[in-house]
Image: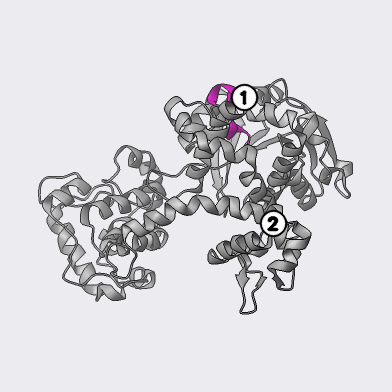
Amino acid sequence: MPAYRSTSHRPDLSPGGIDYLAGRSDTTPFVAENDYVIAGRDEFIRRENLKLERLGDPAEISTESILSAPSPGPWNLCGAEKVKSKSSVTKLKRWKGRLRQSPGRCVGGYEDFLARSFIILLELTGSAHVPALAFVVSGKLAVSTTLERFKRITMDDQDPSAPPVEARMYELIFGFMAVPAIGVAARLRIPDLIADSAMTVEELAGPTNADAPSLRRLLRFLASLGIFVEDGAGKFRHTPLSESLRSGAPQSLGGLATMLSSEYMWRPWGDLHHAVLTGEPGFDRVHGASILEYLAAHPDELAIRNAAMTSISSVELPQILAAYDFSQFECVADLGGGHGALLHGILSKHPTVRGILADLPVVVAGATLPRSKPVAERCEIIGVDLFERVPAGADGYLMKYIVHGFNDKDALKIIKNCRQMMNLDAKLLLIERVLKPANQPDPGKFMDLQMLVVAPGGRERTEADYQTLLHEGGFFLERVIPTTGPLSIIESRPL
């Protein structure tokens, strides 16, 4: 990691910058609601300079040094665990709503504000000392969760050894080659063929019916990405990345790579321009049918799609099971659950829970996991169109990767069908990507563009979007539970 810029660069604590942050134009220290509002700029600057002096050489700044630095007093505003004023926890809860209306003014540990304050400070100062400033305003959470991102944002432009912007853009432009290359390797089952021993291109060309010189070029390209490695004898062996493509890997992504690189999914991306101009999915224009209609008429492609969903589930299932306690339900209905990998995982972990797998008849026909012991006796499999009805009899209804595939109107049809079948004490769980604020790295924004290309009206949504959608469908959003992966569990109850 490059070093921080020199100590001669101090934060731009100009009156305009501090006024913008504190929302005040005078110099009088201003303390209200137990120090939850930033003071006037003179006092703020004085305490900030004290903080910077105690931190020492900016080149030595780290998460540990910031978090362990002495506090200049209650101005540190590190959240409920640091605010020692009377009724601090109660005050924080009461101020939670006000923080949304007054970003940049109120502090006190509220997570959404912490993220916003760091971004505001970064824009104001452009300095390597922003983490120290953010610590004074926002507390430990902001620093510990954003320091590495800050380093990425600020250091690339400062490090003389960093590649020029043109070189990075060049790499991004040619990045389109990676997906089809990875997919071809998975489709040819090269990760399975290599297994535990290195193989030459000639040894791989036979069972794959590939042209040896062309296969060598493919593997050489993948090795440059860290997918396989070529030794001095010209043999290719596995790396951790290529291992993840093996069909027998505990969390294999080979099925996903095969689907995303297949012709039926790849061609619509060539029509992204039309999709952006019109809002119409490229898939429909290229194939003359919606993705659901296309898959119903092409069983081979449907099999690839289902394998991909199972592939994704193998990665996301442990994350979901660790984040949410499904034992609270007597019966869980997995709506649009495909081949039942998620439901099988839930029933396997919780032997007292019963399950219902509901999806289109052509889909559930291939659901082998829920039909296997020991969960088969506790699992009912129903072929159904969710737009027409959902099965009754569950107290927990869940949909994973379903709502994001539809516009609000169509998604509401399914949500309202759920509401008709649910008692007031039942819960609806949407397992989806919840979009992060603007400019933050977010896998959900990649998937959102995929939805634009392949799904009519499909999109990823923010928490506020889900709150509105669920309310219109007759539900109250209770909480959003993040997993350790890209997904969140959106828990709601009937109104």
Q: Nearer the viewer, residue 70 or 466?
A: 466
**Residue 406 among magenta residues:** yes
Query: Residue 60 sits in which quadrant?
Result: bottom left
- Residue 288 tag number: 1
Q: Residue at horizontal 45%, vertical 25%?
A: 278
Q: Residue at horizontal 30%, vertical 43%?
A: 103
Query: Residue 409 sits in which quadrant?
Result: top right
Task: Characterize the local packing of mark 2: few (<14), some (14-19) or many (20 or more) Cα atoms within 10 angstroms.
Answer: many
**Residue type indicated by callout 2:** Ser
Q: Position of residue 93 (x, y in %)?
A: 41, 45
Q: Which residue carries the number 2 mark?
A: 252
Q: Position of residue 217 (x, y in %)?
A: 59, 62
For the C terminus, the quadrant is top right
**Residue type indicated by callout 1:** Gly
- Residue 25 appears in the rendering: yes
Q: CA distance from mark 2 to mark 1?
A: 32 Å
- Residue 401 appears in the rendering: no
SS assignment at label 2: loop
Is the magenta region chiefly helix, strand or loop?
Answer: helix
Magenta extent: 401-416
Q: Position of residue 108 (x, y in %)?
A: 34, 52
Q: Residue at horizontal 59%, vertical 41%?
A: 266
**Residue 337 among magenta residues:** no
21 relative position to 201: left or right: left
Q: Nearer the viewer, residue 53 or 80?
A: 53
